[in-house]
Amino acid sequence: MAKKQLDEMSFLDHLEDLRWHLIRATLGILAAGIIAFMFKNFIFDTIIFGPTNMSFPTYKGLCSISQFLGINDTTFCADKFPFVIQNRTVSGQFSLHIWTSIYAGFIVAFPYVLYQFWSFISPGLKTTERKSSRGFIIIASFLFFLGVLFGYYIVTPLSINFLANYKISELISNEFDASSVIAIVRSSAIASGFVFELPIIIYFLTKIGLVTPQFLRKYRKYALVIVLILSAIITPPDIASQVIVAIPILILYQVSIYISAVVVKNQKRKESKVKS
């Protein structure tokens, strides 16, 4: 879209443009969701319910680490989890199939959704801003998928292992609803995916002047508290799990400080060139 055409667009024209971008993004999610719907066995048996089996790679790795450290009495080395998965509503499995396919479609179509978002806002940016933001979709998608993998292979197994083995009485047996198990997998993966977008968010906040590297360094200790609280929310309440989740988030925060410093440095360099 040319700059002149963009300036001539009214508020309603912008809304209409946004509507079509949202429609295309929704269609992309639905198309990916339909494909996920067709691969029901792989989506549920292999992916969704993978962390409920002790053969899951994370449990094998943690079991090996525990044995190496001489810790033999650990739930990571059990034969199976002490629970069964059940469905208690007539339309429960069909509803879970549809909604899980939609969420899977969103994850798969995330780069396309970002592309539609970027296509809407990029015409309003300056040429230099568009050039400096080149690769936004690739980097943001990479961070999102990296976060999803972290949530799936780290947060989800730790949560399921802790909650499945936690008991208040031996008289109570665990019979988990399928919707509850799927919710843990879904929320852990998608929430982690968005958390890993922190460097991208800091980049744009620095570009528009709302955040500076000095601000991020000054409030680092408060960020540490927030990260620990966030880790406590998305993981079971044991120290080891919270530390495992907090470490990559703190690394992302440190990377965000570096990115913010680079952005400010480049902006000052451009300003000095303009003045000279």
Image (tube, helix red, strand yellow):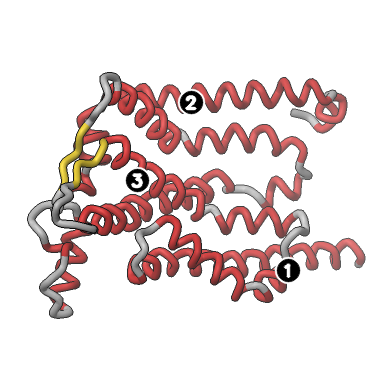
Q: Badge 1, how many Cα within 10 Å: few under 14, some, many 20+?
A: few
Is residue 178 left or right of 82 when viewed as pictured?
right
Let me know if residue 254 appears in the view: no
Q: What residue type is labelled 1?
A: Lys
Q: Which residue is drawn at 45% across and 57% down?
A: 233
Disc 2, disc 3: CB below 8 Å?
A: no
- Residue type at the position of mark 3: Ile
Q: Which of marks 3 and 1 is nearer the N terminus?
A: 3
The disc placed on residue 28 is 2
Residue 97 percent location from the top left of the image? 31, 26
Image spot of residue 110 (x, y percent):
48, 37
| Quadrant hosting residue 48 | top left
Alpha carbon distance from label 2 to label 3: 25 Å
Between residue 169 and residue 163, name the one nearer to us: 169
Can you see residue 156? yes
Cα separation between marks 3 and 1: 42 Å
Residue at the disc numbered 3: 184
List x then y, in percent, for residue 9.
Answer: 83, 24
Direction from residue 37 to residue 115 in the image, left or right: right
Q: Distance between the residues labelled 2 and 1?
A: 38 Å
Q: Could you say which disc has been placed on residue 265 in the image?
A: 1
